[in-house]
Each structure stands twice: as C-alpha cells, then as structure tokens.
Image (cartoon, rainbow, N blue to C red):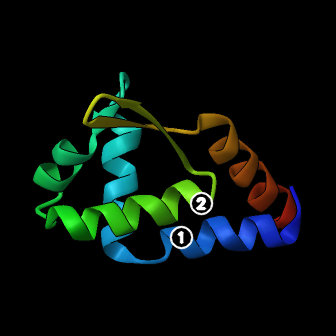
C-alpha cells in the first residue's frame, strides 16, 4: 500500500461520525442501505450521504444501486491492506 493511500483511508476514518458509519457497514455482513446507516448511527440522511461518499472515495466501502436504494459494503481487502501496512510500520 502506498503511503498516500493509507493517509486517505486513515483521514476518512479520523472523523468520529464517519468511523461510526464505517463500523456499522463493516458489521453488516450482507451490506446495509444508506437509510439504515442513517438510522443506526442517528445521522441525518443528507449528512450520512456525505460521510458515505468520503468512505467510498477512500476505497473503504463499495456501493451497489438497486432502484432507489443504495447498499454499502465494507471493502475488506482494502481494510486488511491498511491493517497490514500499519502493522509492518510498527515493526
């Protein structure tokens, strides 16, 4: 993983609400809709949308649109690469 990619991912997770949103997505094995994210994290839907966009742009989540519904899933490979990058840096 490139250093700047790690910076982008860590920056995306550095905001408390965004971290809470990411954790809600990561816990949802089959994905979670944007409205469910807003409900579970007690976030206004428009604010959740902004946070979801940041997480998607950082490569931490992916989204699939089905009609008017958008489902988000954690990008587990990207998260594992970030964890490996940090672990190797700590050696």
Residue that carries the numbered disc 2 in the rendered image: 57
Residue that carries the numbered disc 1 in the rendered image: 12
Q: Position of residue 9 (x, y in %)?
A: 63, 64
Q: Position of residue 77 (x, y in %)?
A: 68, 36
Marks 2 and 1 in Cβ contact (< 8 Å): yes
Q: Nearer the viewer, mark 2 or mark 1?
A: 2
Decide which of 22, 62 is in the foreground and name it. 62
Decide which of 28, 62 is in the foreground and name it. 62
Query: Which residue is painted at 36% across and 68% down in the image?
Result: 50
Decide which of 34, 26 is in the foreground and name it. 34
> Which residue appears farthest toward the front when viewing the image?
67
Q: Position of residue 25 (x, y in %)?
A: 36, 43
- Quadrant of the snapshot with the C terminus: bottom right
Q: Secondary structure at mark 1?
A: helix
Q: Position of residue 89 (x, y in %)?
A: 85, 65
Classify 10 Å Cα crowding around label 1: few (below 14), some (14-19), many (20 and above): many
């Amino acid at each position: 993983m490139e250093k700047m990619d790690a910076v982008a991912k860590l920056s995306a997770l550095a905001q408390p609400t965004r971290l809470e949103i990411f954790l809600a997505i990561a816990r949802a094995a089959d994905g979670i809709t944007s409205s469910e994210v807003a409900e579970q994290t007690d976030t206004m839907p428009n604010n959740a949308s902004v946070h979801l966009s940041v997480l998607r742009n950082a490569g931490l989540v992916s989204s699939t649109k089905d009609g008017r519904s958008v489902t988000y899933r954690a990008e587990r490979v990207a998260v594992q690469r970030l964890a490996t990058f940090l672990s190797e840096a700590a050696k």
